Amino acid sequence: MEVLVQLEQVSKFYEEKAAVRDLSLKIEAGSMFGLLGPNGAGKTSTIRMMIGITMPDSGTVTLFGKPYSSGALRRVGYLPEERGLYKRMKVIDQLVFLAELRGLGAAEAARRAKQWCERLQIADSIHKKTEELSKGMQQKIQFISTLLHDPELIIMDEPFSGLDPVNAVLLQDTLLELKRQGNAVLFSTHRMDQVEKLCDTICLIDKGHAVLSGGMREVKSRYERNRVIVQYEGPDGFLSHPSIAEYKSFAGRAEIRLKPHADAQELLRTAAATSTITKFELAEPSLEDIFIETVGGRADA
């Protein structure tokens, strides 16, 4: 699989503070890559070095197999976390203008803009000014502007911010379709459920360092299946069982984390002795669990 962007031992300092330190990663065509980390971890600094907004202090960045060059940016679509639209400009005029900056002619830009607006269900707003639209609608315009020039590498920083669940699914489906067509998609987000559902590969960075990286399935396989979901009717005395490290209890439902190497079947027998168990599921940790465990364990590092 072709590698579209690769960072090798990249570091970036601001004064004496390391925003990114010795970071290596690669993103392949036809893949969805999740760049994760708490606030201030170095995610945005990493993205900016990928596309030449800033240059690394050490290490190398290659884009489409070559050292960075400004000409390569016509093959990249970038949606920054800090949005920037012209509030008094009509949607169609704005999209055409932004596409022309990427090298499209006005007629082709208008044609593609109208197609994308139809696809993302905002065609009725194409002649409205941006300031007349909701935050979610404006987010869709930004999303479209990132894709109009048909980029091979799509980089999105918090792409689902401000979207309701229906529109978030619409954008997710669009990104998955682009991936199937061979595009590479990198997105940075705090929404672990979206990363877990969409991404093939992840890199979790904290304080500028990569602390966890690899294929999604391979990363999750490193962790013990010690999460239990129990739905029950009756008393909840079994939640004091010594095998339980912690739990969250709701009405007739408990989400449990077992102690290392605990016997889930023993817990099931104890629960069934006093309550009616309608569901007992042993699950691998979620990506959110892994994120909290990994970053929390480095809090004083």
Image (cartoon, grey):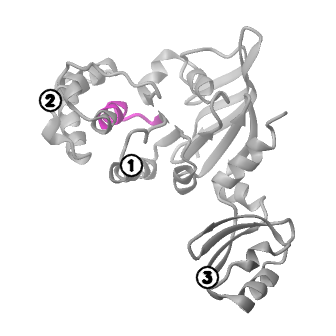
At 67% from the left and 82% from the top, the residue drawn is 235
Residue 110 x %, y %: 18, 30
Residue 74 x %, y %: 41, 24
- Taking the image as shown, residue 234 lies to the left or right of residue 114, namely right
Q: Determine which residue is flagged by label 1.
A: 168
Q: Is residue 144 magenta?
A: yes
> Alpha-carbon neighbours of circle 1 within 10 Å: few (<14), some, or many (≥20)?
some
The CA span between labels 3 and 1 is 33 Å
Cβ–Cβ below 8 Å for labels 1 and 2? Answer: no
Vertical comparison of 239 with 60: above or below: below
Q: Nearer the viewer, mark 3 or mark 1?
A: 3
Vertical comparison of 18 with 7: above or below: above
Residue 223 x %, y %: 77, 60
- Taking the image as shown, residue 111 lies to the left or right of residue 237, namely left
Q: Is residue 191 magenta?
A: no
Q: Determine which residue is flagged by label 3.
A: 232
Q: The residue under label 3 is which amino acid type?
A: Tyr
Q: Determine which residue is flagged by label 2.
A: 128
The CA span between labels 3 and 2 is 53 Å
- The C terminus: image quadrant: top right
* Range covered by the magenta-colored residues: 140-154
**Residue 103, located in which quarter of the rendered image?**
top left
